Image: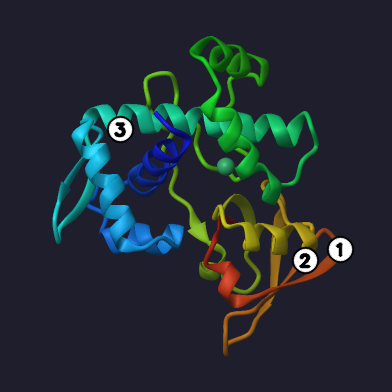
Amino acid sequence: MTRHEEEYIRHIYSKIEFKDRKIKIKEIADDFNYSKQSVIEMIKKLKARGYVSYIPYKGVSLSIEGRKIGARITRVHRLWELFLVRELDMSWDEIDKEAQLLQHATSELLEEKLYNYLGRPDYCPHGDPIPDENGKIPKKEYNTLAEAKLGDTFVIHKVKDDPALLKYLEDKGIKIGIQLVIQSILEYDGMIYALKGDQELIISGESTKSIYGIIN
Ligand SMILES: [Zn+2]
């Protein structure tokens, strides 16, 4: 399988890992910024190999084999992400590209060694679950920061894997595991003023919809 094909399957997998559904060609085209025609061509190729099912105008989903491969690629990808952050001190927003290159070259033996080396982790640095050897993922229900109310404490568990957002949060020192106490919420656009320890942070209303965690 080429790297490009892997990325397609990983992308489709990421959209259905919690909830099975059909994905429209347009949705994939928009995500990748490709033309619909080029997405259809790739999907037909993946269908011929038995990785996806595709019904014109209805959408795309993964076959059982495609789902298995999607879980495995995702697992390796997220393990490398964790390695890059933890061992090489790379930042959130840098790791996706590197993990794509590494995941493509990873044998099952290396995958196993990496998994054990990292202490058999459950989550990547973005807070996304790492599927186990059988493709099972730990399920968790999170709230978004946008749902938090005045005075709530919000613990961040997951952030949408979007480079621009990650850079924005990184610059503010916002990471997985930190705790925010909501000080005020701007009614107009949902902008949040929050305390992280004794540091006051301003978080744009738009980004609060892509920050997931637990409200206390
Ligand atoms: Zn990740």
**Residue of label 3:** 67
Reply above or below: 6 against 184.
above
The reply to whether residue 92 is in sight is yes
Q: CA distance from mark 2 to mark 3?
A: 41 Å
Check disc 1 and give the amino acid type: Asp
Furthest residue in direction top, as rendered? 109
Q: Splitting the image into 4 quarters, where does residue 37 fall?
A: bottom left
Quarter of the image where ligand 1 sits: top right
In the rendered structure, find residue 195 and report the number of the disc placed on it: 2
**Front-most of residues 144 and 91:** 91
Callout 2 crowding tier (Cα within 10 Å): few <14, some 14–19, many ≥20: some
Callout 1 crowding tier (Cα within 10 Å): few <14, some 14–19, many ≥20: few
Q: Earlier in the sequence, mark 2 or mark 3?
A: 3
The residue at 82%/58% (across/down) is 197
Q: Position of residue 78 (x, y in %)?
A: 56, 34
Q: Are marks 2 and 1 in contact (CB under 8 Å)?
A: yes
Q: CA distance from mark 1 to mark 3?
A: 45 Å
Image position of 61 (left or right of 153): left
**Residue of label 1:** 198
